[in-house]
Image (cartoon, grey):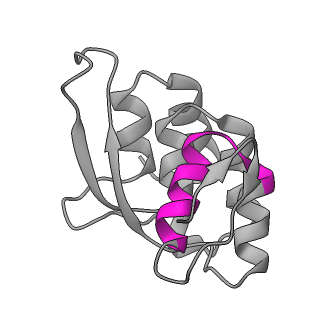
Amino acid sequence: MAGILNNKVIKANKQAMPAEAIQAASYNNKEALANLFDQGIAIDCTADMFMRGPFLTREEGINIKQATPFMAACAHGHLELAKWLAERSPLRSIHYANEDGYNAAHVSAYNGYSNIVQYLVLHHDSA
């Protein structure tokens, strides 16, 4: 089974890789992301992400369909990782909105990461 353990990427099959990239970005694991990108996963790959906001109970949350690693980093408040991904991402993935219309600014604002929203507005005009 593919997974991230102790900041290392366990071999992942091609189908699991987008989910692995979302998980790595959610946990601020740049090493795992770099490894996945080296294995051929696209930096703007998408997979579903379950997100708990600050106002939700442990059982509640929302499913963000088709999140990118950039969105996952922003959603979890990892500004330095978001910047690292933005430097390597095509512009379309920074401005990407999923089928429900959510983009990186939406998910970071939802979780109260105003520093990331400010970064996106000032540097990428994606709000």
Per the picture, the main secondary structure of the magenta-coloured stretch is helix
Q: What residue lies at 50% left-to-right and 24% top-to-bottom?
A: 114
Please determine whether, in this image, residue 116 is positioned above or below residue 44. Answer: above
In the rendered structure, which segment of residues is drawn in magenta?
Answer: 17-31
- Residue 82 position, x and y percent, is 66, 47
- Residue 29 position, x and y percent, is 71, 46
- Residue 84 visible, this orientation: no
- 21 falls in the magenta region: yes
- Residue 56 visible, this orientation: yes
Q: Nearer the viewer, residue 72 or 2?
A: 2
- Residue 74 position, x and y percent, is 53, 42
Please determine whether, in this image, residue 126 is positioned above or below residue 53. Answer: below
Left or right of residue 110, residue 61 in this image: left
Please determine whether, in this image, residue 85 is positioned above or below residue 113. Answer: below
Q: What residue lies at 53% left-to-right and 51% top-to-bottom?
A: 23
Residue 13: which quarter of the image?
A: bottom right
Left or right of residue 98, residue 114 in this image: right
- Residue 119 position, x and y percent, is 62, 38
Q: What residue lies at 37% left-to-right and 53% top-to-bottom?
A: 103
Q: Nearer the viewer, residue 115 or 52?
A: 52
Q: How many numbered circles does the render carry?
A: 0
In the image, farthest residue toward the front: 1
Q: What residue lies at 61% left-to-right and 39% top-to-bottom?
A: 27
Q: Nearer the viewer, residue 93 or 20?
A: 20
Left or right of residue 20, residue 62 in this image: left
- 71 falls in the magenta region: no
